[in-house]
Amino acid sequence: MTPESVLEGLSEHGRILVVDDDEPLLNAIGTLLTSVGHDVTLSSNPLEAVQRLDGIEVVLSDILMPHMDGLELLRHIKARTPEIQVVFMTGFGSIKSAMEAIRAGAYDYFTKPFDDVHDVFRAVGHALEKSRLEHRARELSRQLDADARFAGMTGESAPMQAIFRLVNSLAATESTVLIRGETGTGKELVARAIHLQSQRRARPFVAVNCSAFAETLIDSELFGHAKGAFTGAQSARRGLFETADGGTLFLDEIGDIPAATQVRLLRALEEGAVRPVGGDRELHVNVRVVAATHVDLKRAIAEGKFREDLFYRLNVLTVDLPALRDRMEDVPLLARTLLARACARIGKEAPTISGDALGALLRHNWPGNVRELQNAMERAAALARGEVRAEDLPAELSIDHSGGPAPHLDENALYALPYAEAKRAALQDFEQRYLAARMSGGASVSAAARAAGMDRSNFRRLLKASGMHGDDNEG
């Protein structure tokens, strides 16, 4: 059997550390593993080996060595990086030690001198697969933990990393928080993340959109009402402050509450007490308020629409959420995450996102922010077959084929992609722009193809693939 044929039995090349004080054998094993494509590090000293574990997936080690035996090396490895798999080489006289190592967490062992080098290849290959499975499981667990703590917020851009750090800091306090940002930027997600990382996480998180209630009902909604307080109040009702007692109350669109309610809200914040509408006694509540708005409250104060004292009571700690257009490098990751969630809800495997669709996502300005992207991915989840194409996205994300310049592909977002994916999106963007330029001014397909130096049928095929249409008549 050739080294090349062995490769067919291995999933991928791996990063292997070989440890043995027998240097001729050490070099021989290193040569064998390198011959089938593995990235191999050699160490004749186990004390040195424990300093060389960064990036290693599998350790292939002798058991009986000076300075540190294989069992102690195993304990060091598992304490530091549990997903690294350890395969031991042992002589017949130390099989008992090898069995003890298996019980201590080693993946496998084989005896030396070995009769068939392919036993070594197979042992390393299987250990490599297990290492990667455990690494993926650990990464998924970390991701799920982060999703839980950050309420599903996603982003690797500098603005979002700053938001994550700020949320961590704010969660440790009890002060009121004001979240500012455009509609659709995820203000409620930030409020939930603050709650989930706070000491109040075991208590209720209650969210209310203040603009959703008529002026006559908002007081009753927030503070509750007594029986007979107004027509239709046939029984007493708890307000949201009382419902959120011990937890967090999220007041979205705080700028829309009427003037009379602003007075009562200020009292609730200052004194920790609410009086139900029509009630004759106050109720003391322990509630942390997180408010949000997309309007400029300082301008609302100047226009007499919002109380200045309430603003300063709310504006103790502030979070300013970036618009999606200001963190376009997050669009690919967000799109995949939202697509996966949308597919999971309908019991469908998430498709890949094609280069033309990715280009359309990166050219769009996202006036509706993350909410608009979420809607686009829900549409794609329903329509896509195999992969998401540009035609699976909402019409407003498509290139303008009227002859005007194509929207610009965001370069920061492009550079945030892996090389192959960025190249695919950039090529798609170039083709869209080039074809749009050739077809501008009402040019016919034949004339545009001649100008491009292409066969007309090939040019038409490119047009069709890009979603463009042209007049076949000579102009």
Image: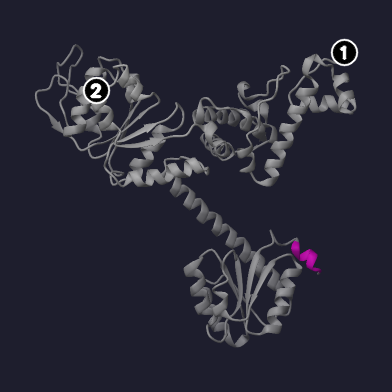
Percent position (x, y) of residue 79?
A: 47, 69
Circle 2 Cα neighbour tier, 10 Å, few/some/many (<14 / 14–19 / ≥20): many
Percent position (x, y) of residue 244?
A: 25, 34
Query: In the image, 251: left or right of 467?
Result: left
Residue furthest to the left in view is: 280
Q: Which amino acid does label 1 sit on?
A: Asn
Q: Nearer the viewer, mark 1 or mark 2?
A: 2
Task: Give the main secondary structure, helix, strand or loop, of the magenta stretch.
Answer: helix
Which residue is located at x 52 percent, y 32 percent?
Answer: 324
Residue 354 found in image quarter: top right
State which region is magenta. 2-7
Q: Is mark 2 on a helix, strand or loop?
A: helix
Query: In the image, 266: left or right of 347?
Result: left
| Residue wearing tag 2 | 262
| Residue wearing tag 1 | 473
Numbered badge on residue 243: none
- Image quadrant holding the N terminus, namely bottom right
Which residue is located at x 28 percent, y 43 percent?
Answer: 200
Which residue is located at x 67 percent, y 28 percent?
Answer: 390
Q: As rendered, which of 232 and 214 lies closer to the eye?
A: 214
Circle 1 Cα neighbour tier, 10 Å, few/some/many (<14 / 14–19 / ≥20): few
Residue 287 vs 400, above or below: the answer is below
Q: Going from the N terminus, do you reach mark 1 or mark 2 first? A: 2
- Image quadrant holding the C terminus, namely top right
Query: In the image, 8: left or right of 202?
Result: right
Q: Are marks 1 and 2 in contact (CB under 8 Å)?
A: no
Percent position (x, y) of residue 269?
A: 21, 32
Q: Is mark 1 on a helix, strand or loop?
A: loop
Residue 21 found in image quarter: bottom right
Q: Distance between the residues labelled 1 and 2?
A: 68 Å
Query: In the image, 4: left or right of 156?
Result: right
